[in-house]
Image (spheres, helix red, strand yellow):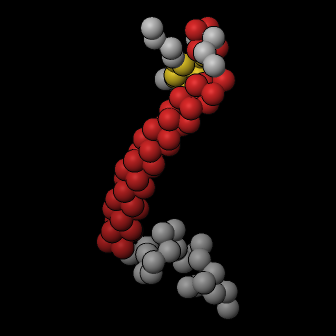
Amino acid sequence: MKTEIRLTADVGAGEGDIKIMPHFEGMSTLWQIDVLQDWIWSLDNEYNKRMGVWRDECKAIRKKGQAERKKAGTVTNKHWSCTIDGCTVHYPED
């Protein structure tokens, strides 16, 4: 017998939800919380893996942008958005 919770996603909105199937509700409470904890652990691991990938992607995008700004002469430091008009740390007002 399958006892499940369905994970659904709205692709356009990027939102997710769960749907608890009726036969899941019929199982004992201890069984339910044990299975839920297993699923939560697995989902948390998947989430953390993908967060790592996303962070790496963001670092690559920032690095590329910094290189482009440096080549264009608009960045002379480590601030990702530092320009003469927008950084009071490296270009303090007189």
Report the front residue among 74 and 38.
38
Residue 22 coordinates in the image, percent (x, y): 61, 8
Q: Is residue 93 above or below residue 79?
A: below
Residue 18 coordinates in the image, percent (x, y): 59, 22
Report the front residue among 63 and 51.
51
Please state if 50 lies on the left or on the right of 71 as rendered.
right
Q: Is residue 10 visible?
A: no
Q: Residue at x 52, y 22 (%)?
A: 7
Q: Is residue 7 visible?
A: yes
Q: Quadrant of the C terminus?
A: bottom right
Q: Is residue 29 above or below residue 49?
A: above
Please state if 14 lies on the left or on the right of 75 as rendered.
right
Residue 48 coordinates in the image, percent (x, y): 45, 48
Q: Is residue 29 above or below residue 34?
A: above
Q: Residue at x 36, y 73 (%)?
A: 70
Q: Residue at x 54, y 78 (%)?
A: 84
Report the front residue among 10 and 62.
10
* The quarter of the displayed image where residue 86 is located: bottom right
Q: Residue at x 55, y 85 (%)?
A: 90
